[in-house]
Image: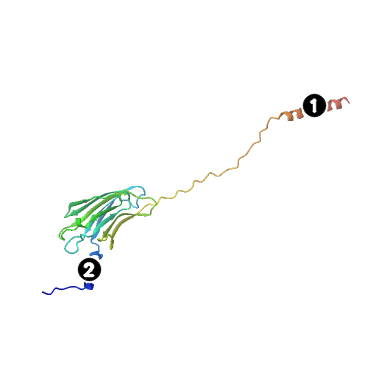
Amino acid sequence: MRSTILKPSVVCCLMMLIILVWVVPVSATFQIQQSSLNPATTPLEPGAQQSVIAEIVIIPQGTSTFIVSNQLQLTTYLVVPLWDVQVMVDGRPAAVIPAQGNTAFINGFLLSYPNNNDVSVSASVKGIVPTGVSSVKLLQVSQLNNAGQTIPGAVQTISESVEIPATSEPATSPSSSPVMTTAVPTKASGPDLIILTGGLLVALLLARTTKKS
């Protein structure tokens, strides 16, 4: 029986094709469909506590709901965030995702089901609105391929503007008015008193002399 031997060039082409198929970017397979803020007042108050709740619906492509080798990355720019992330399948909790810091990752295996299932992610994050910024990304959802790279076009963000505090005007000092000074007579010192007394005595002697003559 004759065996078929592939040429090295053909083998290299096949390997390259497999690699390209494995890491080639795909279109986004999720959509943020619902979101709410608490408190709902905008623009947000810097330094205040803020939370956002979002439903991320997984859009099936092919026979499964999500690519197993991909993952979702959830990011917030709130300060000291607290996460509550769950994978929902047909309206029921299927997995709780632990998260610390500003980023949470959801493995594609937890999102991959037969395409006749409804899969979504319930994501809630609460933190402090940063100061010194004009806007903040409350929640950003990105799809990463098996190489950990963000798939182009597979990024969705919930952002809100932040209130800019009014600058306080410098306090104005009261207008200065001219101050009038009053000269206060001072008591004559010792030498001045002697001169004054001597002058009076000389005047008296001259007056008496003139009177006698």
Q: Name the foreground residue: 194 vs 15.
A: 15
Where does the N terminus fall, quadrant-wise?
A: bottom left
Within-10-Å neighbours for mark 1: few <14, some 14–19, many 20+: few
Q: Residue at x 78, y 28 (%)?
A: 198
Q: What amino acid is at disc 2?
A: Met
Residue 112, image x, y percentages: 18, 58
Look at the image and tell me whether residue 38 can be seen.
no
Q: What amino acid is at disc 1?
A: Leu
**Label placed on residue 15:** 2
Q: Name the foreground residue: 45 vs 142.
A: 142
Answer left or right for 120 relative to 177: left
- Residue carrying label 1: 201
Q: Name the foreground residue: 10 vs 166.
A: 10
Residue 30, image x, y percentages: 23, 60
Nearer the N terminus, badge 1 or badge 2? 2
The CA distance from mark 1 to mark 2 is: 134 Å
